[in-house]
Each structure stands twice: as structure tokens, then as C-alpha cells.
Image (cartoon, helix red, strand yellow):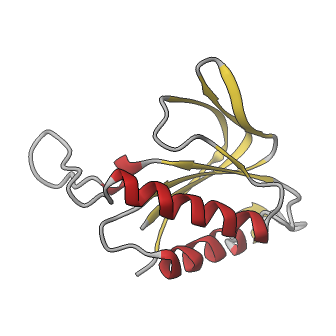
């Protein structure tokens, strides 16, 4: 399971020309689910994401998490994060969780994340999404849990 976190000034997701998720200042999270992932692993990752300190505090250091920074969270499923890219010139998506299982797990993780952070916004699983963002910094981190 992988998450790509980007600190943003603003971010939104559009599907068929309609905005389905939007935040101002906060965190855009792309989430990739792998073959071996499960809800327990996902809870650990969601908890880590929400506690991850990569917003500037009063001293200008990365000391605040998204709640302390009074930011939003936009969570977007992205199976391409699970691609193997070490060999060849084409990504191998074999490590990604099959779509039906991934959809179910993704929804469970969205529900869990929303319980922890009620202002959570999302994209639409498996939709052709257009993601607009202004990266703040730029600040981008990849998180994984095992």
C-alpha cells in the first residue's frame, strides 16, 4: 500500500466536467492498493497520513499535521502507484489489487478516514479523473506501510 502526499494550496478532482472533491490549503493524497493489502494495513496508513507533520508550524519548520494546520484532505485512488517500473519501458501493474477488491477496500478506507477527519473529500474510484492542484513548496512525500 502506497500513498503519495502533496502539500497543496488548492486541489480539486473533476469527473465528466463536474467537481466531485475540492479542498483549499491542505493535503492531496493519491492512494495505491496492492495485492497483499488489507483493511488493517490501510488503517495504519490512514492514521500515519493524518498525523504526518509536513505543514509549517510557528517556527517555519515541518511540525504540524493537517489538523493542526487547519487544512483539508483530498483522497484519490490511483492504482498506477503500485506499478513495477524497475525493468523495461512499460509499467507492470501486476502488483496492484484487482479492481473489485480494491474498490471495496478503498471505500472501507474512505469511511475510516472520514471517521477520523470528517472534512475528507474524495475522487471517484476508477473514474477518468482530472486532478487540478497547486503544490505548495513543492512538498511531496511517499508513504508505505507493511
Quarter of the image for the C terminus: give it: bottom left
Q: Residue at x 61, y 41 (%)?
A: 123
Q: Position of residue 34 (x, y in %)?
A: 34, 64
Q: Residue at x 24, y 61 (%)?
A: 95
Which one is nearer the viewer's eye here, 27 or 99?
Answer: 99
Quarter of the image for the N terminus: give it: bottom left
Is residue 65 at least partly visible in the picture? no
Would residue 95 appear left or right of 34 to someone viewing this image?
A: left
Q: Which residue is at the far top?
A: 17
Q: Position of residue 52 (x, y in %)?
A: 67, 71
Q: Residue at x 16, y 40 (%)?
A: 90
Q: Is residue 9 above or below residue 46?
A: above
Is residue 143 at least partly visible in the picture? yes
Q: Position of residue 4 (x, y in %)?
A: 51, 56
Q: Quadrant of residue 14?
A: top right
Would residue 39 appear left or right of 14 to someone viewing this image?
A: left
Please give the count of numbered marks on the rendered protein. Answer: 0
Q: Position of residue 33 (x, y in %)?
A: 41, 61
Would residue 48 appear left or right of 38 to someone viewing this image?
A: right
Q: Is residue 15 above or below residue 28?
A: above
Amino acid at each position: 500500500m502506497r500513498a503519495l502526499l502533496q502539500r497543496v494550496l488548492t486541489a480539486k478532482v473533476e469527473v465528466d466536467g463536474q467537481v466531485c472533491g475540492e479542498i483549499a490549503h491542505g493535503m492531496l493524497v493519491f492512494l495505491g492498493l496492492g495485492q497483499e493489502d488489507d483493511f488493517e494495513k490501510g488503517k495504519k496508513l490512514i492514521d500515519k497520513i493524518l498525523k504526518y507533520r509536513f505543514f509549517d508550524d510557528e517556527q517555519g519548520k515541518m511540525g504540524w499535521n493537517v489538523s493542526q494546520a487547519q487544512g483539508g484532505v483530498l483522497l484519490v485512488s490511483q492504482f498506477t502507484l503500485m506499478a513495477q517500473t524497475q525493468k523495461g519501458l512499460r509499467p507492470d501493474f501486476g502488483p496492484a489489487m484487482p479492481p473489485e477488491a480494491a474498490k471495496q477496500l478503498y471505500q472501507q478506507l474512505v469511511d475510516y478516514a472520514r471517521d477520523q477527519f470528517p472534512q475528507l473529500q474524495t475522487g471517484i474510484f476508477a473514474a477518468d479523473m482530472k486532478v487540478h492542484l497547486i503544490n505548495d513548496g513543492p512538498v511531496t512525500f511517499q508513504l508505505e506501510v507493511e
